[in-house]
Each structure stands twice: as structure tokens, then as C-alpha cells.
Amino acid sequence: MTYSIGIDSGSTATKGILLADGVITRRFLVPTPFRPATAITEAWETLREGLETTPFLTLTGYGRQLVDFADKQVTEI
């Protein structure tokens, strides 16, 4: 199975999804805190919990450049 995670770190909310073979299997949503990297890390850890492989991670939004563990950063999805 192929897993991918997408996280959108906005100024008011951080949202994420886990795709398993192109199908959304998990969702994540929290208000973006004072330190957006905290919400990005929480989303990453929550969405990949229990997976046997490390998913590909794409970040977008206001906080997309705040962590160094993303595979890809995009301005807009």
C-alpha cells in the first residue's frame, strides 16, 4: 500500500489527510497555535501512527517552511 500525507498549515487552522492508495483514510484538524510547527508535527505524528512505512509528506500553507522533515513544499494545492 502507498501512503501519502498532506498538511495545510494556515494562519488559523492546520489540516491534514492521510491517503492510502489515493483514498482518504484519516483526517486531522486543529487551530494553529502560536508556534505553527507544533501543529504540523502533531499532524504528522497523528496521521502516520501505526503505519508500517513512512508516508510521503507534502506541506502547503503559511507554515510550510517551518519544519525540515517534509518531502515536498508547495505554495498551493
Image (spheres, grey):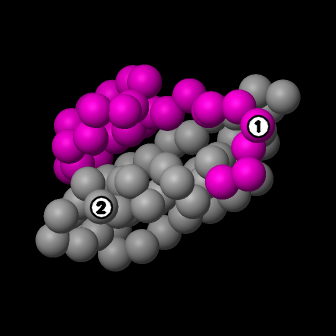
Q: For the point 49% across and 33% down, which residue is it?
A: 57
Mark 2, secondary structure of its residue: helix
Q: Nearer the viewer, mark 1 or mark 2?
A: 1
45 part of magenta stretch? no
Q: For the point 23% across and 48% down, which residue is it?
A: 63
Q: Which amino acid does label 2 sit on?
A: Thr
Measured as percent of width and height from the top left, residue 64 is found at 27, 41
Determine the image quadrant of residue 70.
Answer: top left
Measured as percent of width and height from the top left, residue 53 is found at 71, 31
Quick one: label 1 or label 2, which is nearer the N terminus?
Answer: 2
Mark 1, secondary structure of its residue: loop
68 part of magenta stretch? yes
Measured as percent of width and height from the top left, residue 66 is found at 20, 43
In the rendered view, tell whether residue 71 sits above or below residue 10.
Answer: above
Position of the N terminus, as image quadrant, is: top right
Magenta segment range?
49-77
Q: Is residue 32 visible?
A: yes
In the rendered view, tell whether residue 9 sits above or below residue 69.
Answer: below
Nearer the observer, 69 or 29: 69
The residue beneath circle 1 is 52
Q: How many marks?
A: 2
By secondary structure, the bulk of the magenta-drawn segment is best described as loop
Residue 39 in the figure: left or right of residue 1: left
Determine the image quadrant of residue 54.
Answer: top right
Q: For the point 24% across and 72% down, which residue is it?
A: 33
The residue beneath circle 2 is 38
Q: How crowded is mark 1: few (under 14 residues within 10 Å), some or many (20 or more)?
A: few
